[in-house]
Amino acid sequence: MHYQYKIELNDNNDTIKGMTGIVFQANEEITFFSFDLSGLNKNRKGMIVTDVNFNDPNFSLQEFKQENDKVFIKCLPIQKGNITSVFIQYKGIPSNGLIISKNKYGERTFFADNWPDRAHNWISCR
């Protein structure tokens, strides 16, 4: 239903820190769901999930894992129709989508090029 992103950039290195807040409504009872987020590749670029949590004490995280460019979240049952928010925290060097470089004047720049399907390389999404 709604995404909120918080991205921390810096001028010392290419590592970013991110937090995605995702508000969603369960279309059926669920105990498991996933979002896209690329993990580390062979060049050691990609995002590493550091924490997952809910903002509502009625929903409880059981575990999360990151594999095959997805974040898998297991929780206590969320009933059909319930609306909740999950927060995914991560860090790493984007492998694509967010281009960290210098412009023609030698100044450090950050440019988001998410088209058509690159966003999952640096933000968690569906």
Image (cartoon, grey):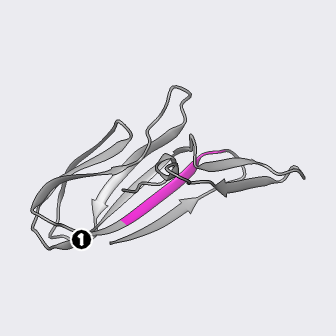
* Placement of 63 over or under 5, stated as above or below: above
Q: Quadrant of the N terminus?
A: bottom left
* Number of numbered discs overlaid on the protein picture: 1
- Quarter holding residue 59: bottom left
From the top left corner, tell me how far across and down residue 63 is, in percent.
21, 47
Q: Residue at x 43, y 38 (%)?
A: 39
- Quarter holding residue 10: bottom right
Frontmost residue, 67 versus 88: 67
Residue sitting farthest toward the right: 105
Q: Residue at x 47, y 43 (%)?
A: 47
Pointer 1: what residue?
A: 84
The three-letter amino acid code for the residue at tag 1 is Thr
Frontmost residue, 16 versus 116: 116
Classify residue 7 as left or right of residue 69.
right
From the top left corner, tell me how far across and down residue 55 is, in percent.
28, 70
From the top left corner, tell me how far across and down residue 124 is, in percent.
42, 54
Q: Residue at x 35, y 36 (%)?
A: 68
* Placement of 46 over or under 18, stated as above or below: above
Classify residue 126 as left or right of residue 107.
left
Frontmost residue, 119 versus 94: 119
Asked if the magenta segment contains residue 19, the reply would be yes
Classify residue 63 as left or right of residue 51.
left
Segment tinted magenta in the rendering:
14-21
Q: Residue at x 56, y 44 (%)?
A: 94
Q: Quadrant of the C terminus?
A: bottom left
Circle 1 — which element? Answer: strand
- Quarter holding residue 20: bottom left
Prevailing SS of the magenta stretch: strand
Residue sitting farthest toward the top: 42
From the top left corner, tell me how far across and down residue 113 is, in percent.
61, 54
